[in-house]
Amino acid sequence: SRPLILILGDQLTESLEVLTQAPDNAVIALCEVKAEGEYVPHHPQKILLILSAMRHFADTLRDKGYQVHYSALDDDDNRQDLIEEAERLADAYGCDDIRVTQPGEWRLFERIQRRGTRWRIHEDNRFFCSIEAFGEWLDGRRRFRMEDFYRQMRKRTGLLMEGDEPAGGQWNFDHDNRNPIKHGLQMPAPPKHRLDDTTLAVKSLVETHFDTHFGTLEHFNWSVTRRQALGDLKHFIAHALADFGTYQDAISDDEPLLFHSRLSAAMNIGLLSPQEVCEAAISAWRDGQAPINAVEGFVRQILGWREYVRGIYWQRMPGYKQENRLNARRGLPDFYWTAETDLRCVRRALEMTRDNAYAHHIQRLMVTGNFALLCGVSPAALCDWYLAVYADAFEWVELPNTLGMTLYADGGYLGSKPYCASGKYIDRMSDHCRQCRYDVKQVTGERACPFNSLYWHFLEKHRERLKGNQRMKLIYGSWDKMQDGKRQVILDQAEKFLGTLTFEAPYGKDDHA
Ligand code: FAD
Ligand code: DLZ
C-alpha cells in the first residue's frame, strides 16, 4: 500500500518520524488552505511566513528525492480545509492510509481522531519531553511547578550539567537578571532577510486573500528557510545572548527586540530544533562568549517553559480552554485591533505587534496581558487575539501562556499568583511613562495612570480568591491600611475609566464565558 503523508505548516522538519519512516512510494502532501488562515484572523506576516516556509520546505523535500504534492491556496480544486484536501489527494493518488504528525492544536487533533482508521497520527518527536513522559512526571504529584520540571529536564538531558550538579553551581541565576534598559545601551539589529521570488509570490496571495486581517506586511523579516533560521541563531548567539539575561524583563519604547532571540517562530514551525538552539547557547558559555546568567536564563525558557506549557496543554485539554476561574466576561478592548489608545505602553506594544507580528514576553505578559487581566477580559476573547497576532502563535504554547500565566484563569495551576501589576512596575522596567499623557505617579484624578486604579480594583474584586495567597498578603496589607474613603475613590476611578472603553461583544459561547 501507498501512504499519503500530510505535513502541516508548523511541521517543517526533515527529522519528523513520519518522514524518516516514509516508504519509497509515499506521497508527501503540503496543503495551503483558507480555513487555516481564517479560523482566527491571523496576522498577514504569520500567514506569509508559514506559506512561504511551506513552499521552501516542499522544494527541499523534492531535492531530497521525495514525491511531493503541493496544494497552493489558489488551485481550482483545492478544498480549502486540511482534512478534506488531504482526503481528496489520498483518493487521487490511490492511498488508503493517511499519516500525520500530531497537530499542535486540539481542534485539528480532535477532528482527525474522529475521522476514523484511515488516518494515523504519529508522535511529534521534536520536543525534549514526550506527552507521555510529561504525564508520568505529573502523575501523583501535589506540586508541579515549572522549576521542578525544569531541573528534572536538566538532569535527564544533561544540558547545562556538570555531572549531577548544575553548571555554574546553581540552578537559577535570576537575581542577576531583570534590569531595565540603561540610557544609551546599544542593541543589535537582527539580520535582514531578502524576500525571494517564492516569498514575493506568497505576499501577493496574502494581500489578496487576507487583507482585512490586523497587521501590516511592510516590515516582514521572518526566516522562511532553515538556512536563514540558522543565520538568525548564529547572529543571536554572537550579538545578543550575552545580555539576554540582564535585560530579559526590560521594555523599550522604541526597540521591539532588545536582547531577545526572536527564534520562537522558527522553532515552532520546525526550522530549528530546540535542542540545537540550547546547545548553541551552551557552547557559547563554554567558549566564554556569554555569561552563565544569560545562558541559563535562555535555556530555562526553552527546556523549561516551552516544554512545560506543552505538557500542561496536552494534559489538560480540552477542558483547559473552558477555564475561567476569575469569571472574566468582557470582550476584547476594541483598540487591540487599532492600537489607538493613549496608554503609551499599551499603544507601543500594539503598534509593534501590528508592524512585526512580534512582541517580547514582557510586553505580552505585563502590558497587553496585564491590562486585559485588570479589565476582566474573558480568556476566550484574549486567547483568540494572541493566537491571531503573533507569528509564533500555536495553541499548545499560546493557550497556557494566555489563559494560565497571564489571566490566572486556571486558578493558579500554571502560575502561583496572578501577574497583575500597577503602572509602577511598567515605569520601573521601561521608558514609556515619561512619554505618556498619563502620570504614573498618580492613582486618582484626570491624569492618573489607569493601570494604578485598575490594579487595586482587580485586587478588591478578587479578594476572596486571592487574599489567602501567601504571595499576595503584603499587597492586601497595604490596600487594607488605606482609609475607606481613599479606597472608594480609587475604585470609582477604575470604574470610570472602564466606562470610557469600548469592549467587543463578549464571547457568546457559554462554556467560555
Ligand atoms: P526569547 O525571549 O528569546 O526566549 C527564547 C525562547 O524561549 C523563545 O523563542 C521561546 O521558544 C521560549 N519561551 C520563552 N518564554 C516562553 C514561555 N513563556 N512559554 C513557552 N516558551 C517560551 N510563545 C510562543 O512561542 N507562542 C505563543 O503563541 C506564545 N504566546 C504567548 C502569549 C502570552 C500572553 C505570553 C505572556 C507569552 C506567550 N509566549 C508564546 C511566550 C513568549 O512570550 C514567547 O515565546 C517569546 O516572546 C518569543 O520571543 P523570542 O523568541 O524572542 O523569545
Ligand atoms: C497557521 C497556518 C496557516 C495560516 N495556514 C496553513 C496552511 O495553509 N496549511 C497548513 O498546513 N498549515 C497552516 N497553518 C498552520 C496550522 O494552523 C497548524 O499546523 C495547526 O494549527 C496545528 O498546529
Image (cartoon, helix red, strand yellow):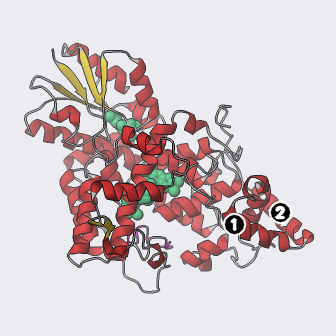
In the image, 293 versus 36, the foreground residue is: 293
- Residue 151 falls left or right of residue 139: left
Residue 468 position, x and y percent, is: 74, 58
Which residue occupies 43% across, 50% down?
308
In the image, 483 versus 139, the foreground residue is: 139
Q: Nearer the N terminus, badge 2 or badge 1?
A: 1
Mark 2 to mark 1: distance in Å? Answer: 12 Å
Residue 398 position, x and y percent, is: 48, 47
- Residue 451, labelled with which disc? 1
Residue 415: which quarter of the image? bottom right
Q: Is residue 259 magenta?
A: yes
- Residue 491, labelled with which disc? 2
Instruction: Name which residue type carries label 1.
Output: Phe
Predominant secondary structure, magenta span: loop
SS assignment at label 2:
helix
Residue 469 position, x and y percent, is: 69, 59
Q: Which residues are magenta?
A: 250-260
Residue 135 position, x and y percent, is: 43, 40
Quarter of the picture containing the N terminus is top left
Residue 119: which quarter of the image? top left
- Ligand 2 falls in which quarter? top left
Establish if 492 lies above or below 22. below
- Residue 37 falls left or right of residue 336: left
Q: Residues within 10 Å of mark 1 (few under 14, many from 20)?
A: many
Establish if 288 lies above or below 107. below
SS assignment at label 1:
helix
